[in-house]
Image: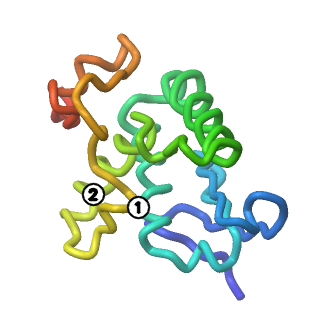
Amino acid sequence: MGIQRFEGVRLIAFNRGAFREGAAVCIPGVGIVASPSSLRSVSLLRHEFGHILQYRRWGFFVFWFLIAPVSLISARKSRKYKGHNHMHRWTEWSANQLSFHYFSKPADWDLSRYPLGPPSSGFHVPPILRSSFDPEGKILPAS
């Protein structure tokens, strides 16, 4: 079996720990890591690819020093506290938005699992990224 890819990004099967329970991680320049069964989910791959798009849009430093830490902490928190919805973090719904538009707004997008915006008004994004979002949480076109 050759190296599998999604939109040119390497897919890495890893079936230990949290990955066995559905966790996945995107490492720009390396690939998308998830369990073999999760790597068959187009919805999950689209979401993880959204993190690649964040990296491409906002760059190395914003991704690695802002997006990745917030996302990883949120993912860990959601595993520990059932009331915490990881997909409600700006890091996640913004990845979904970027991916949704990249894939030309697919009709089969799973809005319940991969929301395209904040759960309510008053969302928080870091000051360095505020100019990238409109008041409803939609990502503005790159200038």
Task: Name the outermost residue toward the right.
Answer: 16
Comparing labels 2 and 1, the label whose residue is closer to the camera: 1
Mark 2–mark 1 CB contact (< 8 Å): no
Which part of the image, by quadrant, shows the C terminus?
top left
- Locate residue 101, reporting x and y percent: 22, 55
What numbered label is drawn on residue 38? none
Seen in the picture, residue 94 relative to 38 is either above or below; the reply is above
Left or right, 106 with reference to 77: left
**Secondary element at tag 1:** loop
Seen in the picture, residue 93 relative to 108 is either above or below; the reply is above
Residue position marked by numbered label 1 in the rendering: 113
Residue 9 lies in quadrant: bottom right
Residue under the image location 16 percent in, 32 percent down: 136
Which part of the image, by quadrant, shows the N terminus?
bottom right
- Locate residue 61, reporting x and y percent: 53, 22
Query: Coloring scheme of the render?
Result: rainbow
Q: Amino acid at mark 2?
A: Phe
First in sequence: mark 2 vs mark 1: 2
- Count of all numbered marks drawn on residues in the image: 2
Q: Amino acid at mark 1?
A: Arg
Q: Alpha-carbon neighbours of circle 2 within 10 Å: few (<14), some, or many (≥20)?
A: many
Q: Tell which of 65 and 85 is nearer to you.
A: 85
Seen in the picture, residue 18 relative to 12 is either above or below; the reply is above
Residue under the image location 64 percent in, 33 percent down: 73
Q: Tell which of 107 and 65 is nearer to you.
A: 107
Task: Name the outermost residue toward the bottom.
Answer: 1
Residue under the image location 44 percent in, 43 percent down: 92
Residue 33 lies in quadrant: bottom right
Residue position marked by numbered label 2 in the rendering: 100
**Secondary element at tag 2:** helix
- Locate residue 43, reporting x and y percent: 42, 69
